[in-house]
Amino acid sequence: MSRLAQTHGLTDIQQEILSTVRDFVDKEIIPVATELEHRDEYPTQIVEGLKELGLFGLMIPEEYGGLGESLLTYALCVEEIARGWMSVSGIINTHFIVAYMLKQHGTQEQREYFLPRMATGEVRGAFSMSEPALGSDVSAISTKGVKVGDEYALTGQKMWLTNGGSSTLVAVLCRTGEGHPEGTAPHKSMTTFLVEKEPGFGEVRPGLTIPGKIEKMGYKGVDTTEMILDGLRIPANRVLGGTTGRGFYQMMDGVEVGRVNVAARGCGVAQRAFELGVSYAQQRHTFGKPIAQHQAIQFKLAEMATKVEAAHAMMVNAARKKDSGERNDLEAGMAKYLASEYCKEVVEDAFRIHGGYGFSKEYEIERLYREAPMLLIGEGTAEIQKMIIGRRLLEEYRFQG
């Protein structure tokens, strides 16, 4: 283990899990990641390995066949996986947001039906809030769920579904108006539906189409898709928690977990960029000595390492706060904002250290340079995080005049 980004106070079990994951990353992910990424190929073998390690059940309670581990353990595992290849961490992130939402908000029947199969990776989760026209304004969603007898008919278009093709269960946020008086706040008329589907593309069940993969600059391998709902029939017992109108709160609770995850991804990618930069700086010679001996490069390495350390500390703090049962939206927002910004800066410095070779597809840093920007917008942009942080600070430090 490196000197940077250590986490104090871990149990023997946590240390053993992390050691196993890091070993898996070094042997099974890093050697093949760049080649798979350049081909935009789904990492089937890596995913099977994660299933065998039990990682799809990491945070699912033991009573449902999972390992029952904390958000901190999960975040530290994500950090390790993102260090190998960020796309792989995306495959398990959306799965865990859905599993977490089921654990926290699902009915007993929903938990018993889905969680044991999610723990083994047999059922794979994705979640869907965003739509083509709304960006960060979740309260403006237009996808509708209309009651028809003892079912709901879902109609609308969703965007930016991570695991849209490979998942078999999607938590979908829709607008449901019944039972809500006129003038009800928009976020109080939203419902989360648990939509089961076959993996793949095209019409995967009547009324549900996954058109195909969205071509992206980075974050390849993992499938990112749209989802088109055209009168899709969902039974009433697949409303998350059994009650309509709670969807916005359920999704926001899941997104807090997701923001800690994105912070952890930023930490992992930044760590890998630092490792690549500090290694290359000791091998590359200019003016008769390794470039690591030039003060300009040492300053870069010092700044990079400090950012890696600071981001890790904030991410760990946000995870521990959520694990303690406390509200962590302030800490998660801060950690996500700082880790994603620092990740971008550390990756760019490592890219600069590599000089012209950083631009070559033969070098791993080229891949990281294209992956880092996704973290600036995933799970809420920097501007959204700053809005959340600002509002929470004004709550905490209300002027008592």
Image: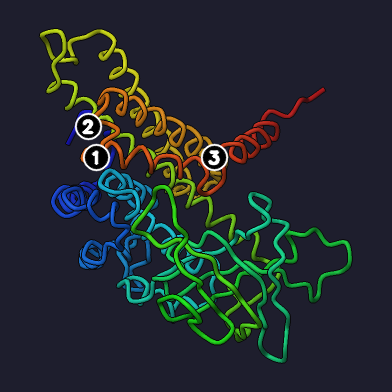
Mark 2 lies on residue: 276
Q: Residue at x 33, y 23 (%)?
A: 304
Circle 1: residue type: Glu
Q: Tag 3's secondary structure?
A: helix
Q: Which of marks 1 and 3 precedes in the sequence?
A: 3
Q: Tag 1's secondary structure?
A: helix
Query: Is 236 drawn above or below residue 140 in the view shown?
Result: below
Mark 2 or mark 3, whichever is nearer to me: 2
Mark 1 lies on residue: 364
Mark 3 lies on residue: 333
Q: Position of residue 374 (x, y in %)?
A: 46, 45
Rate crowding at label 1 as few (under 14), some (14 to 19) or many (20 or more) other CA atoms within 10 Å: many
Spatial CA distance of label 2 from label 3 is: 28 Å
Q: Which of marks 1 and 2 precedes in the sequence?
A: 2
Label 3 with label 1: CB-CB less than 8 Å: no
Circle 3: residue type: Gly
Residue ranking furthest to the bottom: 149
Q: Quadrant of the N terminus?
A: top left
- In terms of image quadrants, where is residue 354? top left
Query: Is 246 drawn above or below residue 395 in the view shown?
Result: below
Label 2 with label 1: CB-CB less than 8 Å: yes
Residue ranking furthest to the right: 182
Spatial CA distance of label 2 from label 1 is: 8 Å
